[in-house]
Image: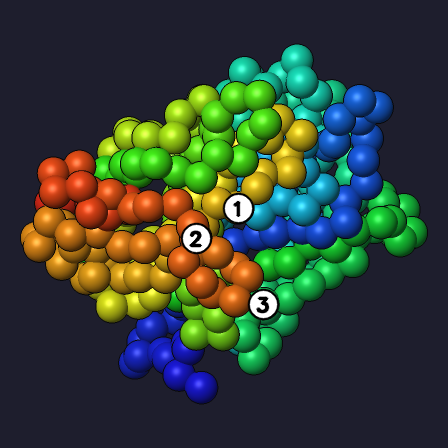
Amino acid sequence: DHFFQGQALRLYTPLELSFSASKLRNMDALSKSDPMLVVYTKMDGRLEEIGRTEVILNSLEPLWITKAMINYQFEIVQPLVFRIYDVDTKYHNTPLKTLNLAQQDFLGEAFCNLSEIVTKFNHSLTLNLRNGSGHALQGTVTVHAEETASSRMAVDMQFHCLNLDNKDTFSKSDPFLRVSRLSESAVAIPICKTEVIKNNLNPVWRPITLTSQQYSSKDDPLLVECFDFDASGNHELIGSLQTTIAQLENLYNSKAGANFYSHKGQKKVRFQLYDTIINKKLLHLTSRRNQSVFS
């Protein structure tokens, strides 16, 4: 396994940690918990915060996009602590960095050493949540580690769709896209999510930027999923597409598009796909440029 390959005099490897959780406790009466994860390192008995995820609304099965960066130091024990909180609605507009964790509902915590994640076959580790006294709580947290890319390139792109399938009864779908990178073990790691466009079957989302640290290489597989947003957190999948940055570039250069597929037998979804210029496809890359992230 050459996942972490050291070099002479190289004492650490920079890693990116991704997080998800399952079967969390529901702390809200009329909706579901709004979970956020905070990760710490433990040094000399003290906790040092290294990152916070975004808040996922109304979800007991959160799949966070925000990553945490950490240096994996060989032959050194690096304890990690993961704590999950249900963020109260009145704090949803508060910047994450200034959010007072003591004012949020505690959903549980888990512990491990960084080496336990790294040495797993697929570099993913699932841990049971516990309370502050160490007693078992409902729910698990999964942590996935990947070595970060050294390239500083980025890609700008803009997606739009036409004639999406309508999943709502009294209105139109509220679509958004989620882009994930597929790891070698086929784990889908979310790297980007568009905004929700309300009541629209022909959405044009704001441009997004993906760095090579997020998509790894132009030929590594990506999963693009289109969902109909639901305020309850039960977003309905409209269709999905497996592709690469290189394939998206070819689609743009050829003025072509790509079909979404349903998860039922991997068949094309029944709605027609279109391109904005030649009216043939649905998913279309309207702009792309490489640039350095650093000026």
Q: Find the distance from the CA under tag 3 to the CA under tag 1.
A: 25 Å
Q: Nearer the viewer, residue 49 or 250?
A: 250
Residue 103 in the figure: left or right of residue 201: right
Q: Which amino acid type corresponds to the residue marked 2 in the rendered image?
A: Val
Pinpoint residue 94: horizontal percent, then vertical percent.
Answer: 55, 17
Q: Is residue 192 above or below residue 181?
A: above
Which circle marks residue 124 in the picture?
3
Q: Is residue 178 above or below residue 213?
A: above
- The residue wearing badge 2 is 269
Q: Quadrant of residue 105?
A: top right
Can you see residue 42?
Answer: no
Q: Which amino acid type corresponds to the residue marked 3 in the rendered image?
A: Ser
Q: Nearer the viewer, residue 188 or 37?
A: 188
**Label 1 environment density (alpha carbons within 10 Å; few <14, some 14–19, many ≥20):** some
Q: Earlier in the sequence, mark 2 or mark 3?
A: 3
Q: Nearer the viewer, residue 6 or 4?
A: 4
Secondary structure at numbered mark 1: strand
Mark 2 against mark 3, which lies toward the viewer? 2
Which circle marks residue 237 in the picture?
1
Indicate the quadrant containing the C terminus: top left, top right, bottom left or bottom right: top left
Q: Earlier in the sequence, mark 1 or mark 2?
A: 1
Can you see residue 8?
Answer: yes
Q: Find the distance from the CA under tag 1 to the CA under tag 2.
A: 11 Å
The type of colouring in the image is rainbow
> Residue placed farthest to the bottom in the image?
1
Pinpoint residue 16: horizontal percent, then vertical percent.
Answer: 44, 57
